[in-house]
Image: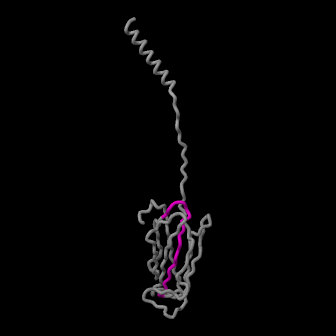
Amino acid sequence: MDTRKLMSISALAILVLALGSALAMWSETLRINATVETGEVDVKWSEWWCSDEGPDPQGEGYSNEEGKDVASCNVEVEAYDDEGDAIKLLVTIGNAYPGYAVDVHLVVDNIGTIPVKLYEYRIDIEEDVPLIVYLVIPEYTQIEPGDSGTYVLHIEVLQEAEENAEYGFEVTLVFAQWNEVIRP
């Protein structure tokens, strides 16, 4: 036999053996089915109260030594979301006068499944309104699911307030998932 034929037959034999081994190889396949369920950011107002629960509280430089209870502060729900959660409150201050200063305590509940932080807040008030209005924010604004945080809205009537006048403003608090907010 000639060497070329011998090599061709040998190569053919090796090819058949290799192909036979490949076809006889055992195998097992692994697969993954995955489901990703997202959580929910959901907050609501749960409690609220005014610091005016007796003699009228006064701003700096004013005094109510007599213990007069002239003005009033009331908080009630103005709007609910589709699930019946309080999402907008109405603060009504009646019979106020210069020097009257009240703190409205507002409790925010995290009823979602994701920790939240205060992302931003706005106080929309016209420049010439004779009120001091500011929000006291807790040092740590993160609220875990099932927990709450308390904010305080300070409202003070200035000397420039007119008699029998009505002044308004709006406060908006926006909460977001904790890892989107830079501040504590």
Magenta span includes 84: no
On screen, residue 42 versus residue 129, left or right, reads: right
Q: Residue at x 40, y 5 (%)?
A: 1
Nearer to the camera, 135 or 164: 135
On screen, residue 76 versus residue 129, left or right, reads: right
User: In the rendering, at what x and y percent does residue 22 appear?
Assistant: 48, 24
Nearer to the camera, 149 or 72: 149
User: Tell me, what colour scheme is on the image?
Assistant: one colour
Please, which residue is most extreme toward the bottom here?
66
User: How many labels sit on residues?
Assistant: 0
Where are the magenta residues, as a range?
98-116
69 in relation to 28, above or below: below
Q: Which corner quadrant holds the C terminus?
A: bottom left
Q: Residue at x 46, y 71 (%)?
A: 122
39 in relation to 58, above or below: above
User: In the rendering, at what x and y percent does residue 118 appear?
Assistant: 47, 66
Please, which residue is most extreme toward the left here?
3
User: In the rendering, at what x and y percent does residue 141 appear?
Assistant: 46, 68
Nearer to the camera, 158 or 110: 110
Q: Residue at x 46, y 81 (%)?
A: 131
Magenta span includes 108: yes
User: In the rendering, at what x and y percent does residue 69 appear?
Assistant: 55, 89
Nearer to the camera, 141 or 93: 141
